[in-house]
Image (cartoon, rainbow, N blue to C red):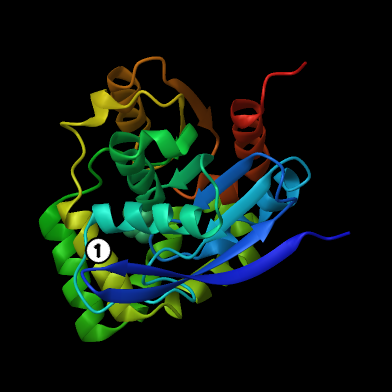
Amino acid sequence: MKHTDTGIVVTTWNGDDTLLHYRTDGERGKPCLLLSNSLGTDLSMWDAQAANLASDFYVVRYDTRGHGRSASGSAPFGIERLGLDVVALLDHLEIARAAFCGISMGGLTGQWLAIHQPQRLTHLVLANTAARIGAADAWLARAEQVRRDGMDTVADGAAARWFTPAFIAREAATVARMIATLRGQDAEGYAACCAALAQADLRAQAATITVPTLLIAGEHDPVTTVDDARWLQQQVAGAQLAQVPASHLSNVEAAQAFTARLRAFVSPPAG
Ligand SMILES: O=C(O)CC1=CCC(=O)O1
């Protein structure tokens, strides 16, 4: 029997209701693993992980606010809002605690949760992320660019930010599908997330994280580097670091290695 479901959660903030789209794979009674996507992608970026892990986990993924089939909301927001959206989703599904895996922007959401809502997390997996990603002025410029000129302006250069040249040559169909998703994102939702990234700086609080943490870095990632992951490893007591042969979207480019690391880290001890 196939255990797949999709739904909508209403998340409310300052009287503003926003609808977020989510999907679950696997049996409700299994340990929950929650997956959070990167800027410009949607929950389908986790297809390989969900296909592998749904036999042993209740895999919950969602489109981050402003992405995919999730609305953006009517007011500007920061990383706190992205974290509280996850809390609303867990509450909606009546899940007390989950393992959380987020990539890039999703990794910032995970750090915020581990800092402010650690009681909701059993494990924290931070992939291709940093406590501060990029520079505020660059994010604000990108937000302005997409608001003015639309998504094509960021979609055209995205493959080179996300994947290695070898992967782009070898997996052209996968790359084309993900770029088409990016091109189809709502420009205002994407821009609002760029503005959230401009503000997000968790460097001063990273050392307060006590949730068991695994960092996954892409060996060839030019956006959030192996050094960014090493910095986080030094801050978070006991954090493990795994490197996979990939660029920024390492769960897509090195799906097998990524999933193996994720599975090993979040699996309950045998016996
Ligand atoms: O610029 C990109 O598309 C890469 C990226 C930065 C933050 C994120 O989530 O993705």
Query: Mark 1 — residue?
Result: 194
Would you place residue 227 above or below residue 66 in this image? Answer: above
Element marked by disc 1: helix
Would you place residue 157 above or below residue 36 in this image? Answer: below
Where residue 249 appears, as percent x and y from the top left, is 49, 50
Where residue 220 appears, as percent x and y from the top left, is 44, 39
Residue ranking furthest to the bottom: 149
Residue ranking furthest to the right: 1
Residue drawn at 32 percent across, 27 percent down = 209
Q: In the displayed structure, does residue 136 sit left or right of residue 186?
A: left
Q: Residues within 10 Å of mark 1 (few under 14, many from 20)?
A: many
In the foreground, 166 or 66 = 66
Q: Quadrant of ligand 1?
A: bottom left
Where residue 208 appears, as percent x and y from the top left, is 26, 25
Q: Amino acid type of disc 1?
A: Cys
Residue drawn at 60 percent across, 31 percent down = 266
Q: Quadrant of residue 111?
A: top left
Is residue 64 at all visible to an observer of this figure?
A: yes
Q: Quadrant of residue 131?
A: top left
In the foreground, 147 or 77 = 77
Q: In the displayed structure, does residue 205 sit left or right of residue 104?
A: left
Where residue 41 appears, as percent x and y from the top left, is 47, 64
Q: What is the quadrant of the C terminus in the image?
A: top right
Q: In the displayed structure, does residue 221 sit left or right of residue 90?
A: left
Residue drawn at 40 percent across, 50 percent down = 106
In the foreground, 241 or 106 = 106
